[in-house]
Structures are given as C-alpha cells and as structure tokens.
Image: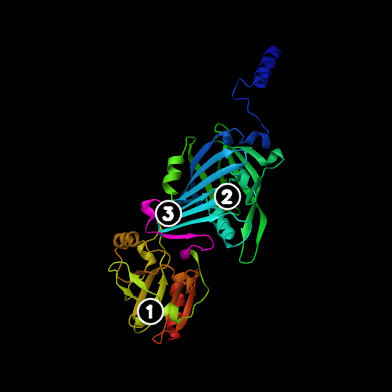
Amino acid sequence: MKKLLLIGAMVCTLGIFSACTQSKYTAADVSVEKFMRHEWISFHVDKYWVEGTNKELSSIGYDIVIHNVDDSTQVIANICSDGECNLLTPQWAKYVCLRDFDVAFYRNMTDGLESQWYDNIACNVLQCGIDFFSMYYPTYNEWCMVTLPEKSTRYKLMADGSLRVKATVTQKHCYADHCEMRDDPLTLFYDREKEMFVAADDIEHGNGYRYEIRDVRFDSRQALIDSVFNLDASWYSHYDRFDGEQFIQSRIVTRNTEMNDTVLDFPIVNVRSGDTVTLRQLQGTTLLHYAYLGKDISGDDFIAPDAYAPQIQNIIMVFPNSNNAELMRSLVDSLGLADNVYYAKGLTKEISINFNRAILIGPEHKTIAVCPAGTDFDKWIREALKKK
C-alpha cells in the first residue's frame, strides 16, 4: 500500500495525471508573453451589459488588429461595428467613419490642438473594446495598466478550466478641464491553453460590463489595414476630410439651446425627399428631436408628425451628425417611418441637440423648453406644453 501511495505522489509531481490539479496560482501562471510574440494579432470583442443574472449582448462589437512592428512599436486598429474605424501609431492616427462620411489624420505633436485630436483617436482605440486588456498594448501604458494581484487567493480555477483573476485596472479618465488616472477593480479570465486573457468585466453589485474575445488570428492583416485606412482611396472622395488643427465636424458640440440666426437658418434636409428647409421657415410650434443613427435604432425611437397635434405643428426628427443620406434613407424605409425625418450634419456645433434630447420652439422661433438626455420624455413634453 505504501508503495502505491508513493508511486501516486511521484505521478502527481511529474504532472502525468491531469487529475492532479495545481491548487494555487500566481501572476506567473497568467503570462501573455508567448501570445504577444506574434507579429500580427487580431480578434473580435463582444460587449455585454450584465445586470443580475441577465447578460445582454450589445449591438456594437469591435474588431481589433495589433501589429507588433518591433519591441517598442505597436500599430493598433479598432474597427467598430457601428462604422467608426481608428488606426493608432506612436507618430500619427487615422479616423474613418463609414456612418458619417468623415476621414481624419492627426499627428502626435508635443503640444497644440493636433495632439489633442490624436489623443482623442487614441482614446477611441484603447478605451473602446480593449480598455480592460492593456496587457495587449504595453507600449501605450500611459492610457491604461492592469495590476495583477500577488496573493494566490485572488486566482481561482473555474469549471471551464480558465483562471479567474481579481485584478486592478488603472485608467486615464478625461474631463472638460483635466485628465486623471483612476484605480478600479477588474475581473479577468485567462485561457490556459491559448495562454491569453479572453474575457474581463467590471461587474460590481451585480451590474456592469463584460468583454469577451473570440476569433483570434495571427496572420497578416496588412491588406485590411491598407484598404480601410487609405484615406486617398476613391471610395472616400466624397467624405469630409480633417487634419492638423481641424477637428471632426460631426463631433464638435455646443451647450447652446437658444434659437439664434445661425440655428434658425441652418439647412435641414428631408431624408426621403431631399428637400431642404430651415427652422425659420416653419410656422407654428416646433419640436426638434434628436435621432440616433446606429445599428440598434427602432421605430419606437421616433415620433410621428401628428403625435402632439394640434398643440405642436412641426415634429422634426433630426440626425445631426451625418450626411450619409443613403444609409439614413434605408433605415427610415426599413422602419416604416413617416416623412418628418431630416439630417443636418454639423448642427451639433450650433445647438445642443445631443446633450439634450429635444427642444421645443415657439411660433416666434424662441426656445420654450429643453429636454436633457436621460429625462422622461413623456413627462417632460406634458410640462413643456403647459409653458406655451
């Protein structure tokens, strides 16, 4: 019997039997060193909202391409399913928006506006989709770093064979007047066979976001990069172009909610007919309502022209960020919407129709009331109509 026990112990020591499982884990057991040796790495990231036991997949996903040019240089592309495409290098960044018809190129300067716009694209790349996976972009660690725990109790072997790691993420958070680094708890999941982290979440008190990686590839994606980010390609000839100290027009916003001359005379184009009107030309009371252009919009997001008749004569649903008329027309037609949907690219520079969901305008072309984003619209409109 003693001889059998001794043989069993030797087998476990040699790691021959899979049943002899390691009981304690450390940071050394979740290394991505081998994974990061590949020159090209690409994968898809799915984003989920987790609330209690419910896990809902977001309509927006991310295709990430990492090109490890050398030990200190990474080129990273983040191609988002909503049409935004960003390419980041240490020297410059490119932006393409298939939804809004925008392309942009900014250099990483030591100071000035151009460097700010470069940082904006860097944020798009590193803090959307791969913001919890900073171990895959170590050369940009000024944006985000993950600290792995020292205690083995923070590592747990899961039923599927992955390792759960309770770590800390330090991320750059930028506000109107400053940026700061902030520590937050982070849960990582490490696939021991693939030798990579495949999932991460910031779920606290039952709610939070979870990111999951799939479709990992190691072949060259240069053809994809050259196709998407060749800003001189003929298929981008009708796009709005920005560089240097020019920022992307569709992303410039204002807090103004007053009906000045610029706002009243701003051309708004009917999505179906192509006819152009202005707010000044409209007679009676007008409701100007923001319309989101994305994959997950539905008919419930739009208001019919006669929804508040006879108190409101004009209900204008406006896409303020794009002039991609073909895309908007196909969405309007597929949802069976009425003819009160318009687009007015650049309107967000003049009137706050993004921070605010809707603006009620009186017959004298003056602002009556403003509905902030996140407000109960039905309650707001009832109160606003009392002010007429």
Residues drawn in magenta: 231-250
User: SS at mark 3?
Assistant: loop
| Residue drawn where x is 53% and y is 46% of the image | 76
Q: CA distance from mark 2 to mark 3?
A: 24 Å
Where's residue 280, x and y in %?
A: 38, 82
Residue designated by label 2: 91
Where's residue 379, x and y in %?
A: 46, 75
Identify the amino acid type marked 1: Leu
Q: CA distance from mark 2 to mark 1?
A: 44 Å
- Say which label, 2 or 1, has the lower sequence index: 2
Which is more toward the observer, 189 or 129?
Answer: 129
Crowding near the residue tagged with mark 2, few <14, some 14–19, many ≥20 C-alpha atoms within 10 Å: few
Whether residue 151 is visible here, answered yes or no, is yes
Mark carried by residue 236:
none
155 lies left or right of 386: right
Identify the amino acid type marked 2: Gln
All told, the count of numbered labels is 3
Where's residue 250, x and y in %?
A: 46, 64
Crowding near the residue tagged with mark 3, few <14, some 14–19, many ≥20 C-alpha atoms within 10 Å: some
Which is more toward the observer, 342 or 357?
Answer: 342
Residue designated by label 1: 279
Please name which of the two marks, 2 or 3, marks the residue nearer to the observer. Answer: 2
Please name which of the two marks, 2 or 1, marks the residue nearer to the observer. Answer: 2
- Say which label, 3 or 1, has the lower sequence index: 3
Q: Is residue 151 magenta?
A: no
Residue designated by label 3: 83
Q: Is residue 233 magenta?
A: yes
User: SS at mark 1?
Assistant: helix
Identify the amino acid type marked 3: Gly
Where's residue 244, x and y in %?
A: 53, 60
